[in-house]
């Protein structure tokens, strides 16, 4: 695998270890004071890690007016919040991670709303009241709780070919690599089934997006999402840091603040898995994937309240 040039690696490290923490601490405090009374309307981008949530969230935030974009909800919320969780790597197993990020019955809706508003106020700028809030895995499991915190919130549920998603689980996150393939399949099923169950209570606030459609019909899908979420075209596009076309976590292939959509990501993932593993994934997760595809296409529920993107 190719590596980034040394200057870019240095810039990234400086951004991560110096600039970002300083901005979060000093800039966040200033923004919280300036935004102390502001309310926000979240667009919760939900999906399993590696399913395209970053691509979707940053694409929306770059093209359309929004107050802020939160890329890792559970990491960015205040550390004393019950919504805060460390990364996957902090947990010995996939099940331990799942248990840690599941909502608890004693969680306070008022406190959860306050903690999230505080998060948005820490990053907000401009006059828009929209907060694009991406939380891979956590938003799938916490959808019911988040819906109670923000009754006007919209959920965008991104799902992807489970073969590519599971391959990403095991390649990118050591916790999943140490576990069995079956545990990755169980986790994929558990987080998506949880979202399906909770979202059935508010289908009019859910938009299903198939990752493969986002990649193949990028402009069209974003435009449909913007209309459904009542987003307005940005007067000035948000700047994004350069990211080389290097496989790994998060968005890649960004040059001059423009996102280059990669059409072959699924094919590359398939090439990395043995045929037996692909067959097992398809057999185990195929029916669940088809249910989500049906929701995205409107075959499962033709209610006019649902917005479908496929």
Image (cartoon, rainbow, N blue to C red):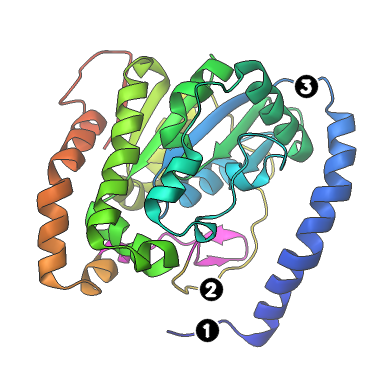
Q: Name the residue under label 3.
A: 38
Q: Where is residue 266 in the image (x, y as percent from the top left)?
A: 27, 62
Q: Is residue 251 magenta?
A: yes
Q: Disc 3 to disc 1, how far (Cα)?
A: 42 Å
244 on left or right of 197: right
Residue under the point 37% across and 41% down: 158
Q: Name the residue under label 2.
A: 244
Q: Where is residue 233 in the image (x, y as percent from the top left)?
A: 59, 35
SS for dot 3: loop
Q: Disc 2 to disc 1, how far (Cα)?
A: 9 Å
Residue under the point 89% across and 31% down: 33
**Which region of the structure is painted magenta?**
249-266
Q: How many labels does the image show?
A: 3
Earlier along the polypeptide chain: callout 2 or callout 1?
Answer: 1
179 on left or right of 273: right
SS for dot 1: loop
């Amino acid at each position: 695998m190719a590596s980034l040039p040394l200057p870019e690696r240095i810039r990234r490290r400086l951004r991560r270890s110096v600039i970002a923490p300083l901005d979060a601490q000093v800039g966040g405090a200033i923004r919280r004071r300036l935004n102390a009374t502001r309310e926000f309307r979240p667009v919760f981008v939900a999906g399993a890690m590696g399913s395209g949530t970053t691509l979707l969230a940053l694409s929306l935030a770059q093209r359309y007016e929004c107050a802020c974009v939160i890329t890792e909800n559970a990491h960015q919320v205040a550390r004393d919040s019950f919504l805060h969780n460390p990364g996957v790597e902090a947990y010995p197993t996939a099940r331990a991670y799942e248990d840690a990020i599941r909502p608890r019955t004693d969680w306070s809706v008022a406190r959860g709303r306050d903690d999230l508003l505080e998060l948005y106020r820490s990053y907000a700028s401009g006059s828009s009241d929209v907060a694009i809030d991406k939380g891979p895995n956590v938003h799938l499991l916490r959808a019911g709780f988040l819906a109670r915190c923000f009754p006007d919130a919209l959920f965008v549920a991104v799902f992807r070919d489970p073969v590519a998603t599971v391959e990403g689980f095991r390649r990118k996150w050591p916790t999943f690599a140490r576990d069995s393939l079956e545990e990755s399949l169980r986790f994929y099923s558990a987080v998506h089934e949880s979202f399906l169950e909770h979202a059935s209570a508010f289908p009019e606030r859910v938009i299903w997006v198939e990752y493969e459609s986002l990649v193949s019909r990028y402009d069209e899908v974003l435009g449909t999402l913007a209309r459904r979420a009542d987003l307005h075209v940005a007067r000035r596009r948000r700047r994004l840091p350069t990211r080389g076309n290097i496989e790994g976590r998060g968005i890649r292939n960004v040059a001059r603040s423009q996102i280059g959509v990669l059409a072959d990501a699924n094919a590359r993932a398939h090439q990395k898995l043995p045929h037996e593993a692909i067959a097992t994934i398809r057999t185990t997760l195929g029916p669940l994937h088809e249910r989500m595809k049906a929701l995205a296409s409107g075959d499962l529920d033709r209610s006019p309240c649902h917005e479908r993107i496929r």
